[in-house]
Amino acid sequence: MRRFIPATAVLSEKTKYSLPLRRWRWRCFSQVAQKEFDNKGGVVVPKMPSFDYAPPPYTGPSAAEILSKRKEYLSPAMFYLYNKPLNVVDGKMQYLFDEKGRRYLDAFGGIATVCCGHCHPHVVDAIVNQTKRLQHSTILYLNHAIADLAEALANKLPGNLKVVFFTNSGTEANELAIMMARLYTGCHDIISLRNAYHGNAAGTMGATAQSNWKFNVIQSGVHHAINPDPYRGIFGSEGEKYAKDIQDLIQFGTSGNIAAFVSEAIQGVGGIIELAPGYLPAAYNIIKKAGGLCIADEVQGGFARTGSHFWGFENHGVVPDIVTMAKGIGNGIPLGAVITSPEIAEVLTRRNYFNTFGGNPVCTAAGLAVLNVIEKEKLQDNAFVVGSYLKERLIALKDKHDLIGDVRGRGLMLGVELVTDHELKTPAKLETLHVLDQMKEIGVLVGKGGFYGNVFRITPPLCFTKEDADFLVDAMDYTISKM
């Protein structure tokens, strides 16, 4: 559906993006100028779906005051989106509200974290009720919340994946998984994928394979295999061809035995890259022959986000030895987990292992509520239906605009990559920033990722509707059409 046609154009849509960036200029307008242009040209600004909620008046500090304090007291490493940072003060389901009460469609979900919806009443009730009764004790005492969630998670996983260790984040979960693999196998070498992101601590930074996220500190024993990227990869969608590089790494970069292979089924920070078909089964087979364990990083792709399955690895027909998770598990509460078999779990009994806040009763009560909401509200089915519809609309938008090079992903974990040249796949970095900012002005929030920063990360709460999907696509169409 092509609703929005540019009222005027200096260059045709096809011609404009085939020219070098220096030969065309942004046609950016202030909000006032845009409205005048729209009125004269007949172009209609996309309208946000109705929603029956209004936040209470906000009486806190302004965005400018918060930004000033942030610059003075918080780490300079903390960055933010948009030319004018957004002050979010309220949230309800798939919507966020700023200090003035303006509503935004949240298509980023706190970086694939809010799965049930912002301030979902059942999750909030679970948190409040547990907090009133017992906020924290220690896992040295018994409490039903941690055991109930562990049982529920184990029942969601295949095979003998039955033992749960709770952490506070995805980085912690991946750190623990890597350590357990090294202890269990007696080997040190880890294989991960180029373009991967698994965390920012000592071991996980080593497994991460983007220079943007790696500091110049010791990161030993990690080898990075060629990324099976169907869009930019050397073998396209032929997954088994990429897997041969793992065999080469084992033969020529290790002793012949390794500790583990760790990968996401869909790379999140890397730009929503779904691994080429056939890759994971071939990779797992090679790893097993080298005595290694297979670790599935489900920090972003888990908890029904892909729609077709509850876990991302299930889309590839494999069963890992260890599964790590975070983000969606708590709907925004700091919670992560590592799940493995009893045999592998046994390695932590060789010494003392302890995590003060891992398995906190408030966090685990929230996690159990999240699982119940996903089940009762059929959010996995919704992620599949709405995600498929959204992807179809984005693919249609790709056919309309040469700026869009690729649309990919599953369910409500989708990526839109912008390029200035389809043949060379030249990253459209400035254009991505412009569209991101202008979509925010219309009322749509999306994320940005990929090594070149030219991919829109669309990971909304799983309660997203088809009307929301239409608004998102129409806003993107409108913004690109006016460039």
Image (cartoon, rainbow, N blue to C red):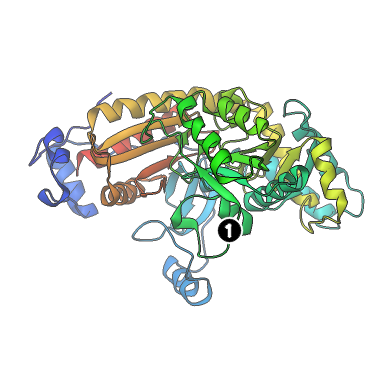
Query: Front-most of 161 and 328?
Result: 161
Q: What residue is shown with label 1?
A: 219
Residue 36's place in the image compared with 477, above or below, is below
Q: Position of residue 234 (x, y in %)?
A: 37, 33
Q: Position of residue 404 (x, y in %)?
A: 28, 36
Using the rendered image of the protein, determine whether residue 334 is visible from the camera's viewpoint: no
Q: Residue furthest left?
A: 10
Residue 455's quadrant in the figure? Answer: top left
Q: Position of residue 196 (x, y in %)?
A: 51, 45
Residue at x 31%, y 51% (from the top left corner): 433
SS class, disc 1:
loop
Q: Is residue 443 left or right of residue 111?
A: left
Residue 98's quadrant in the figure? Answer: bottom left
Q: Residue furthest right?
A: 141
Query: Front-most of 32 and 353?
Result: 353
Quarter containing the N terminus:
top left
Residue at x 11%, y 36% (from the top left corner): 15
Q: Position of residue 327 (x, y in %)?
A: 61, 45
Q: Is residue 210 left or right of residue 136?
A: left
